[in-house]
């Protein structure tokens, strides 16, 4: 069971912003007011003006000319570390360079750092000037009290050239974080790399100024580069908060799922991804709507930025061509001519086409903000989340220590939470009803007086399963004798009260640890002294998020001596633990932050309602582009009752009278409850493994099952809310490339006093494999250390 107080989630809120490439500057309180009247929550503003852009271009241009003339014989200052001249220093910002000034509008503005810099340029001159510009912009934005800045993500290829400057880029972002330590920096990334657009440097970009001698030319075998749908995520992965630019054609679901696991703060909806409906109104495709619904279910839902969907009415756009004209009136970026021709594409998208008359002041719509109205329409019509999502709100990705109901006595409020489950108790009632029906149908002799079937609810808590056992008797028409055994003295009081008030005193309530309960007491008659009888159906719910992690096996072994040796039934009959490797950057960050004060933090399995995670191994789905199904594998299973020989052997080992002791401590009396599994997961796409997700399935009786596995729970026990999954973290995440296998080893260990888990993950590269085909070689890339939760193990 999980220690989660469940609260129903409110409907999702969309925070919608407005971004315009050629925004009139500055963004005044009046413009902001107009935007807010129209329904936008925020606006973007550049940190610097086109004037500043021209100044930097001029500076760069004159420096390059100086170098040119230096190469032709004149003298220039040389840097001490190399023979190249020192880069020019960008002069400090002047009022004309920036539209921002500290005032009351700033909290509603997101600043945008200049997109024309190139932090990952391989030309040290371009990289240096870019860093200077970013540093000045970040420092000034922080000074003004801006809280969020969007920075253009790395341009990796510059058309034909492979910049390979990702490390430089990451280092520059680290520098920016040092300067604006209270700022949220959002790195703007395309959802998937698009080689066709990759070389498209915006107007006045510094990138094309990079000198040939610094550029590494990528040799392309056939002159074309294959589309690498995970390339963008891969670049992002080494930078680590993202602002995601959505493409018009969405990449495969696996890429969408991958971004879902990242700290998404902003979604860019460019005008060009909107379609037109029959009434010529801008709408999103079904797949974009599904994506929006999914992403807005993140615990911290990203903001939405509507980009270039028209001006805020009343504010005129500035002339973009002014960007390219330098202070001295003559400097153009090498890409200006190309950009100028691409500014209005030969074949505009429907949204772009619709914008054109609007930009000329002939708006077709009465609605001044049709895109925003549409997003608001979607917001109002968001489907309700599942029961689990609604009741787990606020607990997504929140790490909780698992309960230890054996050693700790639970509070009444914790039981109250369990009892809210809309499924679990119904399923137990079905299982008991079926078992009673079978008992009679099979003509089995029962152990109670007058042939009543004896049911014992062991670990009865406040008694919900006792109520269900009585109901099952009514439903099946089978006479029962019910016992309730509970070791929690406080719950025992409540059980007795229920018995008086609700169960008409028919239940025998016992306060005992089930392992020391001797069974139903039968009074003797006449000369015959009393004795302990047997139980026919043992009903328990001692399951944790990983099935056996709250010591159900040990407790049920301990009470098995009361069970009818021939016909006795355990409900549950069995339960199995299941695992899957996952990417969970948020959980990893949380655990890493705890580690300095609690070195055992990365060695602890946590109960978590997973939200921003991605399954690293998936199984093919039908149709292939639907949501990929996670590959989750059974680790091990426990069944009850155990063969009596197993329990007898365990008993014989207790006290050390036989055997040489347990392999990892103790006498080995509990060793039959140790488990090990090694499972292989094939990962077609690269990723980072932050740990293992753990689930369980249980067969209560016959075909009545409960499951927490995301791929089977809807079929086996839909809307069950009692358990969140468990997370086994890795101290150091493992990065792996495409086409790898992750070998997961996990142990359930015991020394007769405690139970704990150990786990490790190893990554192997498959060579000679074409998707899905046989690999000829497996190369070990690396592995995690062996993790152990022994220190925080469960006391038996
Ligand atoms: C997860 S709760 C379930 C309570 C209740 N059956 C329900 O479904 O709401 C497990 C209960 O088992 C009790 N329990 C755990 N180990 C026990 C033991 N060895 N003997 C008796 N009770 C135990 C705990 O105190 C707790 O009340």
Image: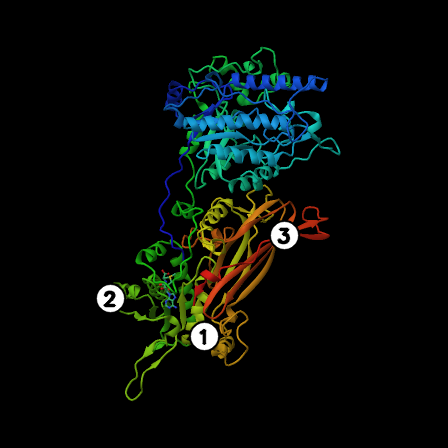
Residue behind mark 2: 500
Residue at disc 3, secondary structure: strand
Task: Of the two numbered discs 1 and 2 on the same chain, state the one appearing first in sequence.
Answer: 2
- Quarter of the image where one finds residue 30: top left
Quarter holding the N terminus is bottom left
Residue behind mark 3: 782
Residue 612 makes an appearance in the image: yes
Label 2 beta carbon within 8 A of ligand 1 = no
Task: Of the two numbered discs 3 and 1 on the same chain, state the one appearing first in sequence.
Answer: 1
Residue 486 x %, y %: 34, 67
Residue under the image location 68 percent in, 35 percent down: 226
Where is ligand 1, by quadrant?
bottom left
Residue at disc 2, secondary structure: helix
Residue behind mark 1: 567
Residue 658 x %, y %: 52, 80
Whether tag 3 and tag 1 are in contact, CB under 8 A, the answer is no
Residue 3 x %, y %: 38, 55
Q: CA distance from mark 1 to mark 2?
A: 31 Å
Whether tag 3 and tag 2 are in contact, CB under 8 A, the answer is no
In screen coordinates, is 561 left or right of 231? left
Residue at disc 1, secondary structure: loop
Q: Residues within 10 Å of mark 1 (few under 14, many from 20)?
A: some
Q: Looking at the picture, does residue 376 appear above or below residue 577?
A: above
Q: Residues within 10 Å of mark 2 (few under 14, many from 20)?
A: few
Q: Nearer the viewer, mark 3 or mark 1?
A: 3
- Quarter of the image where one finds residue 155: top right
Task: Of the two numbered discs 3 and 2 on the same chain, state the one appearing first in sequence.
Answer: 2
The residue positioned farthest toward the right in the image shown? 221
Q: Which mark is residue 496?
A: none
Q: CA distance from mark 3 to mark 1?
A: 51 Å
């Amino acid at each position: 069971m999980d220690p989660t107080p469940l609260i129903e989630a409110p409907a999702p809120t969309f925070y919608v912003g407005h971004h315009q490439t050629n925004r009139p500057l500055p963004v005044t309180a009046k413009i902001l007011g107009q935007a807010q009247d129209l329904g936008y929550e925020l606006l973007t503003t550049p940190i610097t003006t086109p004037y500043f852009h021209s100044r930097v271009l001029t500076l760069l241009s004159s420096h390059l000319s100086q170098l040119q003339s230096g190469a032709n014989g004149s003298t220039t200052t040389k840097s001490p570390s190399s023979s190249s001249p020192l880069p020019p220093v960008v002069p400090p910002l002047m009022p004309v360079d920036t539209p921002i000034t500290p005032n009351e509008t700033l909290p509603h503005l997101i600043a945008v750092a200049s997109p024309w810099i190139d932090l990952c340029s391989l030309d040290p001159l371009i990289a240096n000037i870019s860093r200077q510009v970013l540093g000045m912009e970040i420092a000034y934005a922080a000074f003004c009290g801006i809280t969020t800045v969007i920075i253009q993500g790395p341009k990796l290829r510059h058309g034909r050239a492979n910049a390979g400057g990702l490390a430089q880029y990451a280092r520059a972002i680290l520098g920016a974080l040092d300067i604006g330590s209270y700022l949220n920096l959002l790195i703007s990334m395309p959802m998937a790399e698009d080689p066709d657009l990759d070389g498209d440097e915006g107007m006045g970009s510094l990138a094309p100024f990079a000198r040939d001698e610094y550029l590494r030319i990528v040799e392309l075998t056939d002159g074309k580069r294959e589309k690498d749908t995970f390339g963008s995520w891969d670049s992002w992965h080494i930078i680590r908060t993202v602002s995601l630019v959505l493409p018009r054609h969405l990449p495969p679901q696996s890429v969408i799922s991958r971004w879902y696991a990242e700290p998404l703060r902003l979604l860019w909806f460019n005008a060009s991804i909107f379609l037109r409906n029959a009434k010529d109104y801008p709408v999103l495709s079904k797949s974009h709507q599904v994506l929006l619904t999914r992403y807005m279910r993140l615990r911290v839902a990203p903001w939405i930025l509507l980009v270039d969907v028209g001006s805020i009415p009343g504010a005129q756009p500035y002339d973009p061509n002014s960007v390219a004209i330098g202070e001295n009136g003559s400097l153009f970026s090498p890409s200006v001519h190309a950009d100028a021709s691409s500014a209005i594409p030969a074949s505009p998208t429907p949204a772009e086409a619709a914008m054109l008359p609007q930009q000329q002041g002939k708006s077709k719509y009465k609605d001044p903000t049709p895109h925003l109205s549409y997003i608001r329409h979607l917001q109002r019509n968001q489907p309700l989340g599942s029961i689990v999502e609604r009741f787990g709100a606020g607990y997504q990705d929140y790490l909780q220590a698992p309960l230890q109901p054996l050693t700790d006595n639970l509070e009444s409020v914790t039981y109250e939470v369990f009892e809210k489950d809309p499924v679990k108790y119904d399923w137990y009632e079905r299982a008991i009803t079926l078992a009673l029906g079978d008992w009679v149908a099979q003509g089995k002799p029962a152990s109670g007086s007058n042939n009543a079937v004896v049911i014992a609810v062991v670990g009865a808590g406040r008694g919900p399963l006792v109520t269900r056992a009585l109901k099952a008797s009514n439903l099946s028409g089978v006479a029962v004798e019910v016992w309730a055994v509970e070791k929690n003295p406080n719950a025992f009081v409540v059980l007795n009260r229920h018995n008086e008030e609700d169960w008409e005193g028919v239940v025998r309530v016992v306060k005992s640890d089930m392992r020391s309960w001797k069974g139903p007491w039968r009074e003797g008659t006449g000369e015959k002294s009393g004795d302990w009888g047997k139980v026919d159906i043992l009903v328990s719910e001692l399951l944790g998020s990983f099935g056996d992690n709250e010591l159900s096996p040990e407790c049920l072994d301990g009470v098995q001596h009361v069970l009818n040796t021939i016909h006795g039934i355990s409900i549950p009959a069995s339960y199995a633990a299941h695992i899957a490797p996952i990417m969970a950057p948020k959980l990893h960050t949380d655990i890493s932050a705890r580690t300095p004060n609690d070195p055992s933090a990365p060695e602890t399995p946590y109960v978590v309602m997973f939200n921003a995670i991605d399954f690293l191994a998936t199984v093919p789905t039908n149709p292939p582009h639907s949501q990929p199904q996670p590959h989750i594998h059974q680790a091990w299973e426990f069944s009850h009752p155990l063969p009596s020989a197993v329990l007898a052997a365990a008993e014989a080992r207790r006290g050390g009278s036989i055997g040489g002791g347990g392999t990892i401590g103790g006498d080995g009396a509990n060793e039959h409850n140790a488990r090990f599994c090694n499972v292989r997961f094939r990962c077609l796409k690269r990723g980072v493994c932050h740990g293992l997700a753990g689930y369980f399935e249980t067969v209560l009786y016959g075909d009545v099952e409960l499951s927490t596995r995301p791929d089977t729970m809807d079929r086996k026990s839909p809307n069950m809310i009692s358990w969140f999954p468990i997370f086994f973290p890795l101290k150091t995440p493992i990065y792996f490339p495409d086409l790898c296998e992750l070998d997961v080893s996990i142990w359930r260990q015991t020394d007769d006093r405690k139970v704990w888990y150990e786990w490790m993950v190893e990554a192997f590269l498959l060579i000679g494999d074409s998707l899905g085909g046989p690999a000829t070689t497996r190369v070990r890339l690396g592995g995690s250390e062996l993790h152990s939760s022994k220190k925080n193990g469960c006391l038996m």
